[in-house]
Image (cartoon, helix red, strand yellow):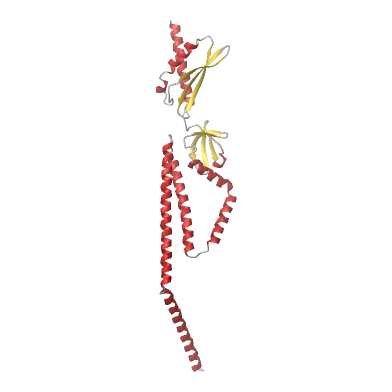
Amino acid sequence: MVQSSMLTIQQKAEKTVDEALSIGERFWNKMSDPDLWLAIAFGAIRILVIILLTRLIIGVINRLIQRFLENQQKSRISVNPRRFVTVGELLRNVTSVVCNFVMILLILSEFNFDLGPLLAGAGVLGLAIGFGAQSLVKDVITGFFIIFEDQFAVGDVIKSGEFRGTVEMIGLRTTRIKGLGGETYMIPNGLITSLTNYSLSNSLAVVDLPVKNEKSVQDTLALIKLALTGLEEQVEAIRSQPEVLGVQSLTTAEYVVRIAAECRPNGKEEVERAMLQAIKEAIEVRELKSMEG
């Protein structure tokens, strides 16, 4: 019986050794197969090419983004450099994420991964986030296009709906505006459906000066022109010499003389006050001289 047990153990050991030798032989045959190494080499080359092409595409797109932003920056008279830095970083990050995601998918496909469930899961997750945060997504997308299209910059005076004031901060989700009375508005970008920007081009300051009919038109026009001569050198906001356009309207009691001057953006009120003050001072000087005479 003991001899029978020893024989059984010996047979099992021999069988195990034979199986190990068979596995080793099959492994050696597989590892020494030139087709296997050729497939591995071609796969490694394809993966390397995918990585290099991804880096190249990212570099080219980043260069195009930089060139586009430089052209946009040169096209504006008043530029906030932080805006273009923000846009550039955002676009570069989006480019990097998208390209690297595609690269990972291509590399996984080289290892024969089934990408269907992965893509389906990513689609369902994106759809759930989109439905759960619609207002947030709308604010972010609108904020991106506000920054990308350079609709307004920090320091610009804008009006959107009932809000008007100076832009203090532009974010991807909200815009902060300081009102003309000192109040601060925080406006979600998704609510900015239309706006007026008062800071992109020069303004036109217009003054309508009422004069009694007893006053001579020629004397009044001459006095106004004399009062406004050289005013553009005294007031920095004025871009050109104020122009006396002539009589704008007429009634039985008075006529109205219109004066206009081109001024810097948002300098309309300042220039109008300066023109009125110069005309008033000239009238006072003329009246004082007439009294002395």
* Residue for point 48% across, 25% down: 204
Residue at the top extreme of this rendering: 293
- Picture coordinates of residue 269 (x, y %)? 49, 25
The image shows residue 108 at horizontal and vertical percentages of 48, 62
Q: Which residue, as the protein is rendered here, is positioned at the far right?
A: 131
Residue 207 appears at what percent x and percent y? 50, 20
Q: Which sits in the foreground, 18 or 139? A: 18
Q: Is residue 183 visible?
A: no
When the figure is inspected, residue 239 is found, relative to residue 18, above or below; the finding is above
Nearer-the-camera pick, 290 or 11: 11
Question: In this picture, is 43 found above or below 176?
Answer: below
Q: Is residue 22 above or below residue 80?
A: below
Decide if residue 286 is in sight here: yes
Please determine whether, in this image, residue 210 is positioned above or below residue 12: above
User: For the point 45% across and 41% down, which residue is it?
Assistant: 83
Location of the C terminus by quadrant is top left
Q: Nearer the viewer, residue 135 or 256?
A: 256
In percent of width and height, residue 103 lies at: 46, 57
Q: Quadrant of residue 119?
A: bottom right
Say how many tags the image has.
0
Say which residue appears at 47% left-offset and 60% top-offset: 106
